[in-house]
Image (cartoon, coloured by chain):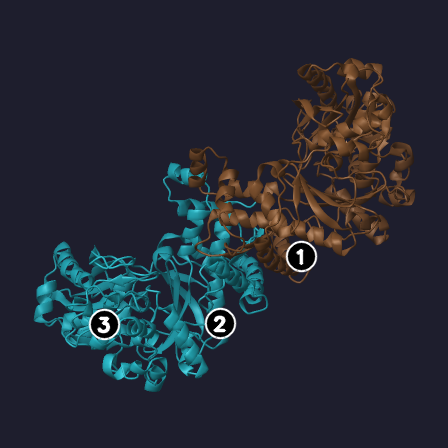
Chain colours: A cyan, B brown
Amino acid sequence: MNKYTIGIDFGTLSGRSVLINVADGNELATEVLDYPHGVMDSRLPDGTKLGADWALQHPDDYLEVLKKTIPAILTKAGIRAENVIGVGIDFTACTVMPVKADGTPLCKMPGFSGEPNAWIKLWKHHATQPEANKLNEIAKKQGQKFLDRYGGKISSEWLVPKVWQTLNEAPQVYHEADRFIEAADWVIWQLTGRERRNTCTAGYKAMWHKHDGYPGDDFFASLHPELRNLVSSKLSTDLFPAGTRAGEITGKAAGLTGLKEGTAVAVANVDAHVSVPAVGITGPGKMLMIMGTSTCHMVLGEKEINVPGMCGVVEDGIIDGYFAYEAGQSCVGDHFQWFVENCVPGEYFSGAEEKGLDIHELLAARAERLKPGESGLLALDWWNGNRSVLVDVDLSGMMLGMTLATRPEEIYRALVEASAYGTRMIIDTFETNGVPVNELYAAGGIAGKNPLIMQIYADITNREIKISGSPQAPALGSAMFGAVAAGKDRGGYDNIFEAAKLMAKIKDRVYKPSPGNVIVYDKLYSEYRTLHDYFGRGENNVMKRLKDIKKQINII
Amino acid sequence: MNKYTIGIDFGTLSGRSVLINVADGNELATEVLDYPHGVMDSRLPDGTKLGADWALQHPDDYLEVLKKTIPAILTKAGIRAENVIGVGIDFTACTVMPVKADGTPLCKMPGFSGEPNAWIKLWKHHATQPEANKLNEIAKKQGQKFLDRYGGKISSEWLVPKVWQTLNEAPQVYHEADRFIEAADWVIWQLTGRERRNTCTAGYKAMWHKHDGYPGDDFFASLHPELRNLVSSKLSTDLFPAGTRAGEITGKAAGLTGLKEGTAVAVANVDAHVSVPAVGITGPGKMLMIMGTSTCHMVLGEKEINVPGMCGVVEDGIIDGYFAYEAGQSCVGDHFQWFVENCVPGEYFSGAEEKGLDIHELLAARAERLKPGESGLLALDWWNGNRSVLVDVDLSGMMLGMTLATRPEEIYRALVEASAYGTRMIIDTFETNGVPVNELYAAGGIAGKNPLIMQIYADITNREIKISGSPQAPALGSAMFGAVAAGKDRGGYDNIFEAAKLMAKIKDRVYKPSPGNVIVYDKLYSEYRTLHDYFGRGENNVMKRLKDIKKQINII
């Protein structure tokens, strides 16, 4: 009898359950539910207004995903619940909520439904920038070495700025909350009845380190006296690496989901990170790029090295026994979308409609006819600042080489090339610092849909690129960890290495660098590097000064 | 009885006659004729194919302008020919033709109508680039000091490269031609029966100097042995400054035009230069910008100084007794047009249509709401290379400061600002080298139509800008010189100073710099300068290297 696992991917706007065959990783059924409350960025459900840069979620939405999508995939595939041996989940992170000791979200407690800080702060809640700035300033002054693991800066998206904002703005929420917990870990708690947190979010988003633990109480006290006991009183030092069995489906959870009580549940994981084994990466030298609005780069290493400008390095953060490195580019799909919305003439849209293409496909088709170097254009891909390797949100976009003959598809291609140069800069920085990157894998919307972009990345990085075989790599990865949580005895696997061998998926089409293009792009990349350093490393800080002038103008 | 003069402006695609009241410069009538043969850039009238970058004209078209438009304005205004005391003309330059000793164009001689080099080479005939390159190389090697008067480079548009191409490609044309003459001077010859050439085109386009004359015969011989006697045999050293009476309308010309035999005719002039007195400039310190697809900057000085990067300095070149300096920006209106054609979303066009605006007006209206510095953008206006002050066609455009919030009207404004910074760079270079520029005047399409652009120029240059009162400044200027050619005795003026006092026209609206904007733009200009020098003066020649790569790609 075949055995199955379920991977559940909690995204920004929806949750998706996927039913996977344990033997071969094949997908049998998938079901998506848009969160009924979506992203709350202007008002709470009771009408309370939110400030700028707020982004909240509703905990009921996550439970609704479990309730609706799990029974749906079982029905669709005609699979009985007793043949489902495990469940794994992944989540956008850092998505943090205050809860009571029994797991009740604070926003559902009497008197708190109108208090914004009592709700779930989604990863892209950015109203915490003042706290993040202050934290970075203090940590830098104290010479806190944890900063080096995060490219020198803690993001406003991460856990401590979010908790600190709560204390600053709604101290009663801070005091009433028994726990601050990742939504990912909270869902596991709802499924298993146990608070079992994962090492991945703790390591990447909460400054935890396998050997050094969290920053010391003195550090937290230097932020705010009442934060001194944050770790011991409201977080947890009991953390479990991916694939660990968090527990089993409780009777209550069985009622909610239609799964059998006792089904194994893996500890939660971050959506990007769980995709790494889903494409078959379980060892060093292979970088996975999750290419969507932004790109997240992950690679495993055998030692802990502080590579400049990365987003984080966490021991056992992705695959047990390895140091998992993360880097990022802030603006990839966003960049192309900006271009399409702001810089493309109407005739291109009508041309696309005539041919039955979407506008990106039309631009790609026209850009594909150009040879490397033919446009004479070169850009710096910093429309949304630079995450890795410069870690500087105040940088901005640049393009040069335009003439009166420059056409939209040339600009489009130059933007694609710029993002590929940015990736090569990240790869070079890893390699220069002793973390090899021999081969690339890509997942996410762009990887599956845009062959031009993938070929340009292969040519510019001079590396083969394999593409995720599943369009739902996170869900597949979660399902794989669900199979590991079940273990061999129940028809799963003893570890992720075995699971990956049989369940991981990549497409047949591999993008191989074209030697002629590699030669031209090497020259262009060397120009990119010069400009990258000139504008990005302090030789000419014009981008920052322009932003300063802009700020002063906006104040007047 | 009122007296009148006629100014005739020969442009690239049409000729225009304007009837002007001598007393006050008021315009009574205007008439335009599109050249029947337009610009011949693919075929001759007999079907002979032309190569790339050729641009020829037909001499009959110029005569047709005289024949059709002069009678038309007299009729329109109800003025009798005997009250027209003078005629002046201006022309695009350098527009050169080979003719026989009696003035017959070679293209009209038997056996030559199918030979491209026998026709008139229009200013924008660029197939002479190889000759221009070789000329510059040889002149530089010989240390020819005339190069300094032209920013170090002779343009492919100028006379000697055009004549040399004729000798190289069609030696029989070169030998059969008794004269090589500016079309401007040829038209004067047709009106007066006399070959009387002007100093303006000779000085700016044929390397002539009031005291040094043309380059020596040895120099011409070093280009090609048969060019040794070019000056003495086929050009002329009898040159006359603007306002000189070239002669009088002949009986034949009276028959053609309807003017009275004996009407005074001024020597010809260049369209841009003749506009200077038309706005009332007859002395130093006042710069006229003719703002169209490109911008031409003219200012008078009291000494001959080799200002780096100017297009030329000619004694008596515009106003007798002064050194006339010319500088230029290669890409102004062209730049905005490129943007509109390649980078503006369809919704902007439909928005413009709804409001009854053209797209430039809509963009200007939206850009006008932005404060200086608010977009955070900064551009180098080199889409068509840089004429002054870098004299480098291999430079290209650059823009930086883009974010995901950048909007089309912000980019549009940044392009306008970039062209204004380019103008300020030219002004600063003049002033640093001892040619003062206290005040600005503007003529041409942009000056009259786009208040946003003019205000930005005033703010960025921190100078008042007066606008030409006549939309036909060249024709008005020509008419003024016609009145001077007639002289006081016949109801005109003795010199251009007197004519300008009464006939020149500027609009009431003067653009004054806004002190707050000046402060912000000073900061932005200083950033522009840094980037101008970084990319333009050799610190980072990336633009040239990208063009080299592009050329190599195109060869493959």
Picture residue at 49% right of the left edge, 72% below the top: A429
Q: Identify the mark at residue A251; answer none if there is no mark.
A: none
Residue B290 occupies quadrant: top right
Side of B355 where A212 appears, left or right: left
Residue A150 visible in the shown view? yes
Pointers 2 and 1 in contact (C-beta within 8 Å):
no
Judge from the rendering whether residue B541 lies leftward or rightward of residue B219; answer left or right: left
Where does the image place residue A435, in percent across and percent down from the top left?
44, 75
Disc 3 target residue: A98
Chain ID at mark 3: A
Rendered image: mark on residue B536 = 1
Residue under pointer 2: A429
Q: Are marks 1 and 3 on the same chain?
A: no
Query: CA gap, disc 1 to disc 3?
Result: 57 Å
Relative height, residue A188 to residue A376 (above, below): below
Pointer 1 with pointer 3, Cβ within 8 A: no
Q: Residue at x 34, y 61 (%)?
A: A53
B349 relative to A17, above or below: above
How crowded pointer 2 is (Cα within 10 Å; few <14, some 14-19, many 20+) is rated as some
> In front: A368, or A422?
A422
Identify the amino acid type marked 2: Thr
Give residue B174's position: percent from left, percent from top.
Answer: 83, 32
Q: Which mark is in front, 2 or 1?
A: 1
- Determine the chain carrying the residue at label 1: B
In the picture, which quadrant includes the N terminus of chain B?
top right
Q: Secondary structure at mark 3?
A: strand
Label 3 neighbour load within 10 Å: few <14, some 14-19, many 20+: many
